Image (tube, rainbow, N blue to C red):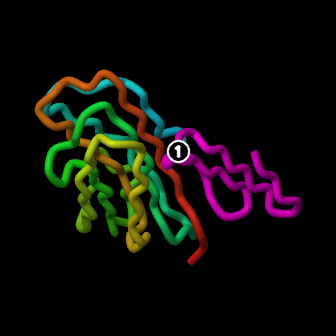
Amino acid sequence: MFKELGTYVWLTVCALVFLSVSAMSFGATLPENTTAALAGAATFTSDTYEIGNFSTVVVMTESSHDSAAGGVMIDQSFDTDCVTATSPTFQYTSSFTYTATAGKVYAAAAVGKCFRVRYTNGGTLQTTFDLTTNLWGGR
C-alpha cells in the first residue's frame, strides 16, 4: 500500500503482474466493475460514460480463460448526447485479445466524448472473471 501526500494515490498490488490504481487527483475508478463469469462466446457490455477531461481509458481484466480474438474492446463516441442517448453511435474502437495467464491492463487514448467497454469471452465458460474500468490523466 502506497500513499503519496498531496495527490492521494493508492497503489494496491492484486497479483504478481496485475495491479489496480485509484487516484483522486489524476484518475477515476468507475462503477463499471464486474466479476460475473461469462459463458462461452458471451459478451459483457458496460454502460456508457462521459470521458470529460481525462486523456486515457484503462481496462484491467483477469480471467480464467482467453477472450475471443479482439475480445477486449474500448468503444468511443463523438455524439453530443452519447451519455443520454438510448443507442449512441460508437465511431472508434480499440480492440485487444486477452490471453489467460495473469491480469492485463489495456489502454486507449481518449479521443471521443463518451466510451463503453465490451468483453467477448472465448469459447470456454469462465470460472473467474474480473474487469475494472478507469479514466486517467488530463487533456
User: Quick one: which residue is furthest to the bottom in this view?
Assistant: 139
Residue 96 placed where, x, y %?
A: 26, 57
User: Quick one: which residue is furthest to the front in this view?
Assistant: 16
Q: Using residue 105 as the reference point, say whether residue 138 is left or right of it.
A: right
Kindly indicate the quadrant of the structure image that contains residue 137.
Answer: bottom right
Q: Using residue 75 as the reference point, say whether residue 134 is left or right of it.
A: right
Residue 64 placed where, x, y %?
A: 31, 31
Kindly indicate the quadrant of the structure image that contains residue 81.
Answer: bottom left
Quickly name the residue at label 1: 16
Q: Residue at x 32, y 24 (%)?
A: 37
At mark 1, the secondary structure is: loop
Q: Which quarter of the rendering shows the N terminus?
A: top right
Q: Is residue 20 magenta?
A: yes
Q: Residue at x 43, y 32 (%)?
A: 34
Q: Which quarter of the rendering shows the C terminus?
A: bottom right
Q: Which residues are magenta?
A: 1-29
Residue 40 placed where, x, y %?
A: 15, 28
Residue closer to the observer: 136 or 66? 66
Residue 70 placed where, x, y %?
A: 18, 54
Q: Residue at x 54, y 45 (%)?
A: 30
Numbered disc total = 1
